[in-house]
């Protein structure tokens, strides 16, 4: 029997697919289209197996859709500007362009060796002048529309990466890349006015096929809230503090006023109390903490007593004024009225400081709340108490009435607030897109004309960060000194470069028309391919890249450049491959080189392993035995190889004698139908498990000599295998005399009569005792089985008011509800 020489097979087909430009698509789709895209990588080094998972998921989807008759745009490129590539280049003592170019070549070779079906004619690199020229062109269009502006701002400066960080680029008190605690500096910075699109960013989520978890993260980040703004007067000061609240009916429950540490009044009050030096130390500490950490519940907060009081606007009673890290200057007005009975953050702060808790909303059902006994705040709706004329009213009605009353009396006004802040895009680094602005003493800030784009990044420059809050470009005087486009006088170029997220905010549009030298893309070609039908990437970009890309697309939609206001119709967020409990990263040094695995077991085996190891949405810890974990998939592929190559004559003949019944053929059709369903929902791990069952049925047909079943089963087996293990599927398809490439063959048709499996009996137990029997489909999911079991009237009677402690489900056989 011929040996399974995976290395020769994979090398031969990789060369053939590249030679034949097998995955190239026309400029305009000739039929129904699907645009499949994985988030493109930073070329700061070669590929690791974490990348392999991302790209294999996308490639399996693209290959499957081709076989379903779609024209599939599946492009690839490199997010080549920015800190990852620049820091790696500095570490290795090479120019960022040279380092990036070498890595791109190696990364591309790895992609081809793994059989990823990309249209390489569309490849792009964001560090190419023909790409970043259009970054600059977009910046100028945004500037013309008032969406790009410069201002002096307090920014978070990372002393390690030596650049500013946008608000969302800090995590757990440190820089999102290196973990260093940031410093606060005052710098003139460029911003994009993303807040102008806050409403639409929220409203347009309704049409997205994204996970609710990601959508909720975006809602929280945008932070829309409608409420009332009123004022608290500071005792002994001619000063009023505006406060925003979404729950004005709880005003009677206010027991303190909390200011953001950065609030100007906090400094004045600390100075008045003779505590300015201590306050400065407190402020310095808080500024190094990330926004997420400052807002986190369940932990003690840094608080500074300002030894001052504010006047309650209704009762005129004094309430203490403090400053607390959980109050953010950028949120609302930078001041919070503390209602500890009805806000969890206020509750925790009041308990920490020993401040009173006053209940003004009681639950409609259940026992009355006792402020002394409360463990958590009551944040729901209820009935008003202890609030004068509002007592007895539903809290929803009281909210409406108190709002109208305070507005009529001039004590408040209706406002809408957002948590979202404008996008800071200035970076004081070399490796990025130069911002196309010059500064003239007479004309001020002047945009570079379109016909002078691109403003090229100089090559001969000491690109290492200076340690100062200024880009290395500032030292290149021959580049900085220029002529004002408006008056012809002396001018100086802007030396900041753009945040690399600008590059990734529109790259999916450039893929529609990557060779265009007259425009970023042809709107007609964008209309032909957009939106991206299936986007694949990590959930860590939920409030970074994804929100920026949505904003960019909406601006271009308003400019009539794109046909859609949303860039990504469906989103698949995959989990990470971890090692030592942490995501693989070159900076951590915990990467696994896929070349080693491919050399031992083959690309097909590695692809199957990363798809089988866990559902796409879950993380997977790379096993301690390393590459040897892939051996199981290699053995499975070798068995497939032996089965097919051992019966090539029979497979090539169309007149082999028939034998046996249709029972096994029905099983083959049922399994293939189930695999198809798994492909549709991207459940590759269960698809592979069923594919192994399908292999057993096909092998049993061969042993029984039922050749009609064997031929039908082999055809379905290879088609089911092709999107995930493309090399062996192509090789075996050709050897058995299949017509054309298997990757261009239509997906086999399932006979619905044969695929219709007999329903099975699901036994439902409570504490091991049978309470019901339900007829279910044999491929019922665990979630659906549990839902049906708990919906059973007999089970409900057995449960009574008791809550299950756990549920053991093994569909389609049984569900056991355990009460104790």
Image (cartoon, rainbow, N blue to C red):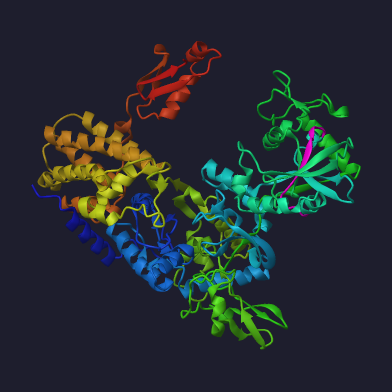
Name the residue: 89% across, 37% down: 316
Count of numbered tags: 0
Residue found farthest to the left? 1
Q: Position of residue 656 (x, y in %)?
A: 11, 41
Instruction: Please name whichever residue, 59 or 713, is drawn nearer the observer in this view of the structure.
Output: 59
Q: Is residue 478 magenta?
A: no
Residue 338 vs residue 519: left or right? right
Work out whether 345 lies above or below 568: above
407 vs 227, left or right, is right
Residue 200 at least partly seen = no
Q: Position of residue 514 (x, y in %)?
A: 45, 69
Residue 150 or residue 2, whichever sits in front: 150
Residue at 52% over, 18% down: 803
Reply yes or no: does residue 258 show up in magenta. yes
Residue 50, image x and y in percent?
37, 51
Q: Is residue 267 visible?
A: yes
* Residue 111, picture quadrant: bottom left
> Which segment did they paint magenta?
252-264
Identify the residue at image location x=77%, y=27%: 359
Q: Residue 249's spot in the image, x, y percent?
A: 80, 34
Q: Image quarter for residue 495?
A: bottom right
Q: Is residue 61 left or right of residue 326?
A: left
Q: What is the residue that sits farthest to the bottom in this orientation?
A: 488
């Amino acid at each position: 029997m011929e040996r399974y020489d995976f290395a020769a097979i994979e090398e031969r087909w990789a060369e053939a697919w590249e030679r034949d430009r097998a995955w190239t698509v026309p400029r305009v789709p000739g039929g129904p289209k699907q645009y499949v895209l994985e988030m493109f990588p930073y070329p700061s080094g070669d590929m690791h197996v974490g990348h392999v998972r991302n790209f294999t998921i996308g490639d399996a989807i693209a290959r499957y859709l081709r076989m379903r008759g779609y024209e599939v745009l599946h492009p690839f490129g490199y997010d080549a500007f920015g800190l990852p590539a620049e820091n790696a280049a500095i570490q290795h003592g090479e120019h960022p362009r040279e380092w990036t170019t070498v890595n791109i070549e190696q990364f591309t070779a790895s992609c081809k060796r793994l059989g990823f079906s990309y249209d390489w004619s569309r490849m792009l690199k964001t560090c190419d002048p023909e790409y970043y020229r259009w970054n600059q062109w977009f910046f100028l269009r945004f500037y013309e529309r008032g969406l790009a502006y410069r201002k002096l701002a307090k920014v978070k400066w990372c002393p390690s990466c030596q650049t500013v960080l946008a608000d969302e680029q800090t995590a757990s008190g440190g820089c999102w890349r290196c973990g260093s605690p940031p410093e606060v500096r005052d710098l003139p910075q460029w911003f994009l006015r993303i807040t102008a699109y806050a409403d639409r960013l929220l409203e347009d989520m309704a049409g997205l096929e994204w996970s609710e978890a990601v959508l909720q993260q975006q809602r929280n980040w945008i932070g829309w809230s409608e409420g009332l703004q009123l004022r608290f007067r500071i005792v002994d000061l001619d000063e009023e503090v505006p406060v925003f609240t979404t729950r004005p009916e709880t005003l009677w429950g206010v027991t303190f006023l909390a200011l953001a540490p950065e609030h100007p009044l906090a400094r004045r009050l600390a100075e008045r109390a003779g505590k300015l030096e201590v306050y400065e130390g407190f402020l310095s500490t808080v500024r190094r903490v990330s926004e997420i950490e400052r807002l986190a519940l369940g932990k003690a907060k840094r608080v500074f007593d300002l030894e001052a009081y504010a006047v309650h606007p209704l009762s005129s009673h004094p309430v203490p004024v403090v400053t607390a890290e959980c109050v953010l200057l950028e949120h609302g007005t930078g001041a919070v009225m503390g209602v500890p009975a009805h806000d969890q953050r206020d509750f925790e702060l009041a308990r920490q400081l020993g401040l009173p808790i006053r209940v003004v909303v009681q639950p409609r059902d259940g026992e009355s709340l006792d402020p002394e006994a409360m463990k958590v705040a009551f944040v729901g709706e209820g009935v008003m108490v202890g609030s004068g004329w509002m007592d007895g009213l539903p809290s929803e009605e009281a909210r409406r009435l108190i709002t109208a009353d305070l507005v009529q009396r001039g004590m408040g006004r209706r406002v809408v607030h957002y948590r979202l802040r404008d996008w800071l895009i200035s970076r004081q680094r070399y490796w990025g897109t130069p911002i196309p602005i010059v500064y003239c003493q007479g004309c001020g800030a002047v945009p570079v004309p379109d016909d002078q784009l691109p403003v090229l990044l100089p090559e001969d420059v000491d690109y290492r960060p200076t340690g100062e809050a200024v880009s290395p470009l500032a030292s290149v005087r021959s580049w900085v000194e220029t002529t004002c486009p408006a008056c012809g006088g002396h001018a100086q170029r802007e030396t900041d470069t753009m945040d690399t997220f600008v590059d990734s905010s529109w790259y999916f549009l450039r893929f529609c028309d990557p060779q265009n030298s007259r425009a970023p893309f042809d709107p007609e070609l964008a209309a032909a391919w957009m939106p991206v039908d299936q986007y694949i990437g990590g959930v860590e970009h939920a409030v970074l890249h994804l929100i920026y890309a949505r904003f960019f697309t909406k601006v271009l939609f308003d400019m009539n450049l794109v046909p859609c206001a949303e860039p990504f119709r469906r989103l698949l967020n995959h989990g990470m491959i971890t090692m030592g409990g942490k995501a693989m990263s070159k900076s951590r040094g915990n990467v696994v080189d896929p070349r080693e695995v491919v050399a031992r077991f083959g690309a097909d085996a590695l692809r199957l392993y990363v798809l089988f190891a866990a559902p796409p949405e879950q993380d997977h810890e790379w096993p301690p035995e390393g590459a040897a974990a892939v051996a199981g998939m290699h053995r499975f592929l070798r068995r497939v190889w032996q089965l097919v190559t051992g019966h090539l004559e029979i497979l090539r003949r169309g007149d082999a004698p028939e034998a046996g019944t249709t029972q096994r053929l029905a099983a083959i059709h049922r399994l293939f139908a189930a695999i198809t369903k798994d492909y549709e929902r991207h459940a590759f791990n269960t698809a592979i498990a069923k594919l192994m069952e399908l292999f057993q049925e096909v092998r049993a047909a061969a042993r029984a000599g039922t050749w009609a079943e064997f031929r039908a089963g082999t055809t379905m087996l290879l088609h089911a295998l092709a999107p995930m293990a493309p090399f062996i599927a192509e090789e075996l398809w050709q050897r058995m005399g299949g017509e054309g490439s298997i990757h261009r063959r239509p997906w086999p048709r399932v006979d619905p009569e044969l695929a219709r499996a007999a329903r099975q009996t699901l036994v439902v137990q409570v504490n091991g005792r049978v309470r019901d029997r339900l007829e279910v489909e044999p491929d019922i999911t665990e979630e659906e089985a549990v839902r049906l079991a708990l919906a059973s009237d007999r089970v409900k009677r057995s449960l009574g008011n008791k809550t299950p402690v756990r549920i053991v489900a093994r569909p389609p056989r049984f569900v056991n509800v355990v009460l104790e």
